[in-house]
Amino acid sequence: MRFKVCCIASIAEAEMAITAGAWAIGLVARMPSGPGPIPDNKITNIAAATKGRIKRVLLSAQTRPEAVVDHVRRCGTDVVQLVDAVPHTTYVALRHFCPDVQIVQVIHVQNDHDLDQAQEAARYCDYVLLDSGRPDGPVKELGGTGRTHDWSLSAQIVDKLDIPVILAGGLNPQNAAKARRTVSPYALDVCSGLRGDGFALDGDKLRAFANATTAS
């Protein structure tokens, strides 16, 4: 099972993820709420230092086509993770101006209607990522909540989509194996579940999570 380590805050943390066998790292740009954002110049530096060794994913809260394209170009990542709903024109602009960049659309799983959203996004994206945010809340939550969601809904989405589905939301070394068995995603995505004091990446938790992704 592949796994992505999100909220990477330094080159040292990126190197830890690579050593642990991570498939991808998540570099979180400015968000309306939640942990882990770092300045764009730091994202650019981490992306440059790890080029060719791991998938580098920019988490962007931008939605307008020109804003997303500019963000991706400045940060220099392989993948952009769109954490909010975007217009169709944003996908078109990314394909035109950033043809080598893969697109991940986040779907915040809350009810049965999210299957329709996931199927629509799958027409334009390389991956769909299922998370536990609340984009319609009093303060927009677009990830990093530390909460799980209804994995039975996620399993239905995985079953219906023809593109890879990544599972996020409240994952940790203790529930990673169950999440993998229940949902059967393409990859697991973890952030706060691997963090310790000062929100630093915890090496022991990282290794435990890596081991759990292959547990029977």
Image (cartoon, helix red, strand yellow):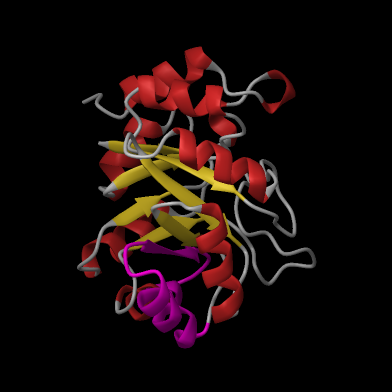
Residue 147 seen in the current view: no
Eyeballing the image, is 209 above or below 9? above
Question: Which image quarter: residue 157?
Answer: bottom left
Q: Looking at the rendering, which quadrant does residue 64 occupy?
A: bottom right
- Region of the chain picked out in magenta, as a range: 87-115
Placement of 124 over or under 194, stated as above or below: below
Q: Position of residue 113 (x, y in %)?
A: 45, 78
Quadrant in the picture for the N terminus: top left
Q: Quadrant of the C terminus?
A: top left
Residue 42 or 186: which is nearer the viewer?
42
* Name of the residue lying farthest toward the top: 204
In the rendered image, residue 106 lying in the magenta stretch gets the answer yes
Seen from the viewer's position, the closer of residues 17 and 178 is 17
Can you give x and y, in whole percent of width and height, for residue 131 in the image?
50, 55
Vertical position of residue 127 compared to residue 168: above or below: below
At x 45%, y 51%, the residue is 77
- x 38%, y 53%: residue: 78
Q: Of all residues shown, which one is farthest toward the right?
A: 138
Q: Is residue 113 magenta?
A: yes
Q: What residue sits 27% from the left and 60% below the top?
A: 158
Q: Is residue 102 left or right of residue 68?
A: left
Task: Give the residue displayed 47% in from the left and 87% down from the top.
Answer: 89
Q: Is residue 98 visible?
A: yes
